[in-house]
Image (spheres, rainbow, N blue to C red):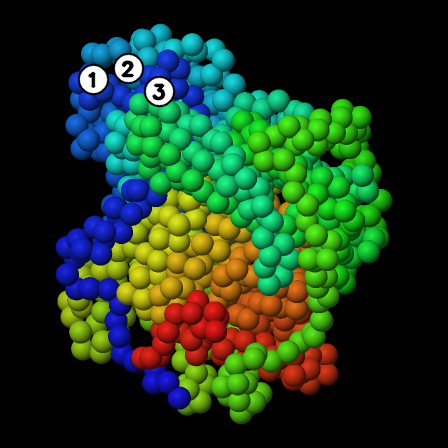
């Protein structure tokens, strides 16, 4: 048996900046710059010269928003503002007096905000109320702090927005739209300065219709929420030290009402109980491109300071162990005047005679190295042909229709051109499955009606003609059409085994030898321990961590492991105090760890105590990382996170978040990657591979599944077709599991077609384990079982949801009662516990361990 690590306090007594912090900050800065998207650059106004003064306006200049609120927050040592970044880069800032005045106004407003939160905490207001208030920072321009013309003719305006866990955004001023004060402020800037640069410091889409009013807004740069090094990264891009190469992972519509789910999303229709996915598979660009809806900025768009030419050279079909692989060879040339990187995106138009399909779908992408002017690079971009199969509900199969699959290549969806295609002589069934998550009968008609209403907007004749023209274009394209041999396909048929013990023989043996009470304890987190409650900080040994697993089986060699929040870095307390005499950690309130402790005053080190520091790196939010379209970069960021997990003795990082951007107003979109499931899955897989290249640590992909709404997230019911579920909302999870085997999956709070995700046998066992081959542990989100009688700990075990977090006595009582009544079988409970023990045995809780990623490759 492996030897358990003991008696290790995390962090360091020396509070000075470490070499690790410096190196990780540099990577966070590089990642932020790589994901920023240049949306507009009239007359090649950017990059900026440092010889001319520039005025900086907007709340984000002084208080640049590094990320969203809630469990995705990170308590970094310090965060670089845009003002600081521009000054450090050598830009002459001409309005420092305005910035100083604004700083005072902002700080006063923020203290009032903190005061209200403290008062609410003292009154023990609900978690939901707390989160809704917590994501309402005072980031708008205060009245009275008007701009005054300073030297120079260039101004930068930073539009900032924050959102977070537990509350959705609103289509109103101060959120999706500008406030009246912001409109007036921006108008004043545009009147005072000849050239204006707009920086969008938001976690998601905002209205940009005001761009049409101001001709002198020369450039628009989406900096998203760029992490702790955001100010430096902005300066890198504005100065041209970094050539922007990011691409949009979402569609930016002309108006909010253009999104197909706008009318009924969350609170918009007054119903936060029922979430009807009436747009079905037509999410994001799949809707706008298929229905010919004009957009302001389309999926995959992003400008550069240089120019590129993308030339397709060849399309080929390659054999693999499974089904055929399509490969596209492209040559990319830098035809401009400065060095830069380009993203090549491959889209496919599939035959759609038997079943409706989007006009185009992303099939693959790749990013070049930095190319000097005149330099070329050849890339071979490959994807499995079966990934373009559609799910046919009537037969329960993934199916490829016969016909021509048209391939497009370009720097964005809008710029993509037909380069050729491949043909199938006859229909191919790639996989046979059983149905999951059926729509409740009472909602089936309503869902069908909503889908039909949407499809009435579709000009089917025009869409058919577009497909036909695309097929015709393949005949005269560079690469032509290649055939895929009908005999080269294999039809997979899933074997559904149901509840099964882990394949880890040691974990199985340990599980069989545990008492019933130990099994019950192992099914939840370590109850009664921690830094103050279950709201995201129930860890004991690592202050600020989210929770720990049970220590009830230490004598059998099962150590407790620590879990910590993400996904913008590791969320721990910046520092904590230890009693010198006992070596015990001094207890601090949970909310001390939020926003670096602003909700409780730091009283300093008390007599007989000593302080330990644990500063973590705040990386860019998930959306910005995905905007890099660089899986190698994201994997490198993952490796960095894995190193910090090791340093602070945390086994499971509760990240990455990978829900689909169904609607721009989802309060947690900043944590997630994209509206596209392929991009989402590949980014999550890259992050997982990076983290799990380090010994004993792993990711927890979340929130599984259909967590597209934060308002009433504990009780809302996501109602959707099985096809939409499989093709859009599960596909990213499937990719991450099959290609990276994360240590863990976290189920979501919501219901999926009437069944809580945590209690869904179809999701946890049928899909994740049987269909995808998931080997790790499945856990609940925090307090899932404490919010209603229809989601129980025993229900989790029956579903194959292995671990209830952080756990409470009521969960233990429920497990005992249902075991006694025969409603929960001991075998099901053992199966779940064995999965947890399998992961625990691979953790850094032991002195000798190896990377889980390598273990899964064997």
Residue 403 visible in image: yes
Q: Which residue is mark 2?
A: 154
- Residue 791 spot, x, y in % from top left: 65, 64
- Observer-nearest of 44 and 202: 44
The reply, left or right, for residue 314 in relation to residue 63 is right
Quadrant including the N terminus: bottom left
Which numbered disc flags the more N-terminal residue, 2 or 1? Answer: 1
Residue 588 visible in image: no
Residues at marks 2 and 3 touching, judged by CB atoms closer than 8 Å: yes
Query: Is label 1 in a helix, a strand or a loop?
Result: loop
CA gap, disc 2 and disc 3? 8 Å
Q: Which residue is mark 1?
A: 53
- Residue 78 spot, x, y in % from top left: 25, 45
Residue 68, compared with residue 101, is above or below; it is: below
Q: Which mark is residue 197?
A: 3
- Residue 564 spot, x, y in % from top left: 40, 62
- Observer-nearest of 780 and 841: 841
Residues at marks 2 and 1 touching, judged by CB atoms closer than 8 Å: yes
Residue occupying the point 55% across, 71% down: 775
The reply, left or right, for residue 477 in relation to residue 243 is right
Where residue 813 sits, quadrant-wise, is bottom right
């Amino acid at each position: 048996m492996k030897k358990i690590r003991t008696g290790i306090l995390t962090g360091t007594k020396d509070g000075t900046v470490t070499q690790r912090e410096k190196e990780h900050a540099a990577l966070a800065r590089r990642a932020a710059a790589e994901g920023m998207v240049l949306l507009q650059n009239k007359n090649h106004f950017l990059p900026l010269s440092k010889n001319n003064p520039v005025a900086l306006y907007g709340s984000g200049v002084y208080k640049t928003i590094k990320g969203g609120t809630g469990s995705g927050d990170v308590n970094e040592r310090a965060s670089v503002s845009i003002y600081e970044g521009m000054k450090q880069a050598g830009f002459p800032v001409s309005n420092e007096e305005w910035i100083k005045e604004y700083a005072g106004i902002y700080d006063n407003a923020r203290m009032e905000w903190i005061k209200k939160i403290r008062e609410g905490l003292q009154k023990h207001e609900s978690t939901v109320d707390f989160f809704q208030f917590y994501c309402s920072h005072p980031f708008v321009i205060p009245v009275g702090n008007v701009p005054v013309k300073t030297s120079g003719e260039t101004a930068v305006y930073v539009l900032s927005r924050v959102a977070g866990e537990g509350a959705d955004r609103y289509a109103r001023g101060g959120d999706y739209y500008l406030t009246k004060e912001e409109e007036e402020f921006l108008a004043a800037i545009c009147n005072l300065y000849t050239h204006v640069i707009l920086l969008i410091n938001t976690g998601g889409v905002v209205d940009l219709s005001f761009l049409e009013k101001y001709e002198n807004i020369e450039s628009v740069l989406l900096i998203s929420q760029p992490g702790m090094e955001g100010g430096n990264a902005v300066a890198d891009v504005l100065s041209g030290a970094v050539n922007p190469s990011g691409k949009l992972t979402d569609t930016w519509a002309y108006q909010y009402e253009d999104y197909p789910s706008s009318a009924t999303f969350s609170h918009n229709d007054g119903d936060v109980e029922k979430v009807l996915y009436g747009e079905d598979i037509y999410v994001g660009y799949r809707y706008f491109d298929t229905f010919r809806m004009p957009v302001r900025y389309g999926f995959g768009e992003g400008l550069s300071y240089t120019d590129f030419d993308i030339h397709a050279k060849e399309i080929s079909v390659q054999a693999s162990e499974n089904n055929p692989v399509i490969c596209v060879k492209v040559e990319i040339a830098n035809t401009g005047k400065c060095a830069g990187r380009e993203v090549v995106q491959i889209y496919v138009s599939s035959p759609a005679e038997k079943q409706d399909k989007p006009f185009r779908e992303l099939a693959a992408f790749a990013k070049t190295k930095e190319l000097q002017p005149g330099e070329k690079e050849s890339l071979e971009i490959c994807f499995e042909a079966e990934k373009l199969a559609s799910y046919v509900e009537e037969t329960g199969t993934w199916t490829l229709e016969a016909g021509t699959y048209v391939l497009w290549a370009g720097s964005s969806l809008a710029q993509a051109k037909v380069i050729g295609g491949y043909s199938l002589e006859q229909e191919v069934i790639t996989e046979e499955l059983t149905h999951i998550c059926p729509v409740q009968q009472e909602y089936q008609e309503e869902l069908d009606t909503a889908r039909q209403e949407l499809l009435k907007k579709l000009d089917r004749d025009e869409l058919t003609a577009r497909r036909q023209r695309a097929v015709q274009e393949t005949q005269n394209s560079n690469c032509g059409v290649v055939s895929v041999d009908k005999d080269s396909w294999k039809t997979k048929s899933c074997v559904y085994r149901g509840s099964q013990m882990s394949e880890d023989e040691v974990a199985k043996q340990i599980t069989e030898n545990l008492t019933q009470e130990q099994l019950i304890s192992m099914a939840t987190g370590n109850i009664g321990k921690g830094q103050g409650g279950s709201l995201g900080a129930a860890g004991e040994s690592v202050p600020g961590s989210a929770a720990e697993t049970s220590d009830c089986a230490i004598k059998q060699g099962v150590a407790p492991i620590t879990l910590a929040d993400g996904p913008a870095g590791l969320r721990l307390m910046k520092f904590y105090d230890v009693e010198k005499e006992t070596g015990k950690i001094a207890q601090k309130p949970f909310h001390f760890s939020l926003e670096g402790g602003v909700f409780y005053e730091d009283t300093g080190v008390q007599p007989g105590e000593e302080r330990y520091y644990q500063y973590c790196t705040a990386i860019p939010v998930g959306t910005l990382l995905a905007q890099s379209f660089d899986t190698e970069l994201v994997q490198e960021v993952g490796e960095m996170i894995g190193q910090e997990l090791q340093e602070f003795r945390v086994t499971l990082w509760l990240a990455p978040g990978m829900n689909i951007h169904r609607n721009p107003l989802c309060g947690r979109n900043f944590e997630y990657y994209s509206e596209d499931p392929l991009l989402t899955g590949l980014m999550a897989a890259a992050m997982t591979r990076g983290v799990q290249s380090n010994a004993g640590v792993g990711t927890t992909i979340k929130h599984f599944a259909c967590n597209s709404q934060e308002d009433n997230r504990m009780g809302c019911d996501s109602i959707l077709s099985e096809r939409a579920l499989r093709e859009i909302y599960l596909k990213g999870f499937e990719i991450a599991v099959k290609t990276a085997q994360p240590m863990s999956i976290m189920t979501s709070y919501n219901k999926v077609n009437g069944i809580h995700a945590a209690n869904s046998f179809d999701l946890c066992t049928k899909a994740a384990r049987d269909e995808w081959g998931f080997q790790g542990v499945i856990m609940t989100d925090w307090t899932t079982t404490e919010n209603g009688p229809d989601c129980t700990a025993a229900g989790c075990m029956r579903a194959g949801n292995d671990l209830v977090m952080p756990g409470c006595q009521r969960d233990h009582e429920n497990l005992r009662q249902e075991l006694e009544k025969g409603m929960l079988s001991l075998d099901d409970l053992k199966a779940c516990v064995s999965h947890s023990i399998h992961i625990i045995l691979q953790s850094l809780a032991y002195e000798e361990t190896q990377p889980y990623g390598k273990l899964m490759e064997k």
